[in-house]
Amino acid sequence: MSQETPPRWDLESIYPGLESEAFRRDVERVREGLDALDAYLDAEGIGRDGPLPADDATLSRRIGGVVERMNALLELYGTLRAYVHGLVTTDSYDTAARRMQSALEPLDVRMERQEVRFRGWIGRVAEDPARLEAALAAPGVAAEHAFFLRETAEQSRYLMPEAEEALAAELSMSGARAWERLRGVVTSQLQAPFARDGHEETLPITVIQGYRTHPDAAVRRQAYEVEQKAWESVQEPLAACLNGIKGTVITLFRRRGRQDALHESLDQARIDRETLEAMLGAMRAAFPTFRRYWRAKAERLGHEALPWWDLFAPVGSAERRYAFSEARDMIVAELGAFHPRLGRFVEHAFRARWIDAEPRAGKRGGAFCMRVPGPKESRVLCNYDGSLDEVLTLAHELGHAYHNECLREKTPLQRLTPMTLAETASIFNQTIMTDAVLARAEDPQEELAILEAFLTDAGQVVVDITSRYLFEGEVFDRRAEAELSAQDLCEIMLRAQRDTYGDGLDERYLNPYMWAWKPHYYSSGLSFYNYPYAFGLLFGLGLYARYREEGQPFLADYDRLLASTGEARAAELAARFGIDLRSPAFWESSLDVVARRVERYVAL
């Protein structure tokens, strides 16, 4: 790879700065909007104990009045929050941005309280289902948000009394959210000494993690060992963060009448337990396929069993690195060949500097895409190191951005997409790019490297995510009885890894600190964050198979699917393509794609 520096994103098209008049004005507009919505709720008696209008037309208008005001607030507040999040995630040393992030949280809490108040009222309306349906039958804002309103009424049964919900929202600022912020600061600022070429330098943990794909085995092993020591040095504050967050979740799901933490997660994912069990069962049945791949990889690298530090090691044409500009041109060309609208969109995203790809101190690890509601844009963060894996990650995140583009004309409440469906476009992009680079492969070593990148990612999504699911389930079970020490968390993680990776890895060298650096565990509002990624991979592969059968006529249906992910349950959207999500056969057919690639990998 050349010495070309990956780009940083441009946030000035959102706001010129935290001190700008535009930013300050919008903060004030949110406060005014919150006051206005509170006044409307009070004037119309909207609350769990408030009166219901006698006639359906008035009820419909009253519901529409709340929805309109909520949409306006979500649009404006979402823009402010995205801007500040963009600053904090790329520079956690920016104390002004972190202070503003904290200052915005009370506004978020007020919106939560208003939403709880409205949800309780809609729940009362839905006690007479015919009344709610009559209100939704009248043309207008309520009818346009029928799915959101029905779902809101359904979820109203899991509310504490209004005063308790308000207290929980306020306490979250100094409770679970504070723990989450602390975890973000600790991990983004973590650095460790690393020796190379006869001298030692202190590197950000994200840079050290990037050495997982380094072509030199000695560098990979040293990076693994240094990373483990680095996480050990901060394990106590991170264990405290995790205990605080999971303890909060347990308290709240019990008070709200939930069966368990998974119950809320399934509702958020818009799937049922039968669907999840069908998918997880198919994934577990595929473990031997992945273990065969890892044993073959160990043999190629000269191991009897694969150690963790070589789990992401390059195989094949290991010396191939992609300059960022090369990755950009390849992604634009290949996605454009699949879908011209998609190609034009990603070209604009690069040109408009929506991407922050440079690894640096203070920047969070991993990758994500965030919507910026006001200007109807997205921003993509990654830590680009020139590997094929990072090329595919970049394409993946741009898939999320394209999904946002397909939803651009929807209101915020119509855009509320579960994570299970939020991965559809990203997995699609990743699959297109994998097929494209495989088709370009000029020799077996290059083909091997491409298959390696695909199987590494698929192994993480199918096997490692199952280990994370098992880990989180045991953490919830045990945290309900007592706090867990850092050692407890490491032991649970190792047990989950042994149960899933099996003899595919050298059990002496696993990753006990996976819990420390994965941000997904540290969300009080979204437990079991990981299995939707597996859903997204397998659903995306299944849809891609339909595309291969149908060709270009599929694209219009694909765009309509992406535009509808906030207004239907997953099973309903899948049924449009003849897919039964409760059938293990669908998930197994998607995993067959992986099995065929493992066969080719072993044969090369």
Image: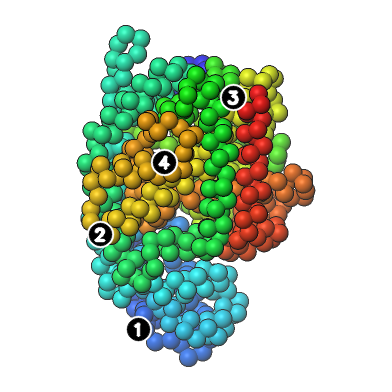
Q: Distance of mark 2 from mark 1, alpha carbons? A: 36 Å
Can residue 345 be seen at all in this image of the molecule?
no
User: Label 4 vs label 3: CA separation?
Assistant: 25 Å
Say whether marks 2 and 4 touch (CB < 8 Å): no
Mark 2 vs mark 1: in front: 2
Residue that numbered label 1 is attached to: 49
Amino acid marked by disc 3: Ala
To which residue does mark 4 refer? 497
At horizontal 55% and vertical 85% (from top left) the residue drawn is 130
**Contact between labelled residues 4 and 1, with CB atoms less than 8 Å apart:** no
Q: Nearer the viewer, mark 1 or mark 3?
A: 3
**Residue at left offset 63%, top offset 21%:** 446
Residue under label 3, please give it. 449
User: Residue 481: which disc?
Assistant: 2
Which dot, 4 or 3, sits closer to the camera?
A: 4
Measure how far apart labels 1 and 4 are at the Cα level.
Answer: 49 Å
The three-letter code of the residue at mark 2 reads Glu
**Are the residues flagged by discs 1 and 3 in contact, CB closer than 8 Å?**
no
The amino acid type found where label 1 is placed reads Asp
Q: For mark 2, does the 10 Å Cα neighbourhood hold few (<14), some (14 to 19), or many (20 or more) residues?
A: few
Identity of the residue drawn at 28% across and 56% down:
479
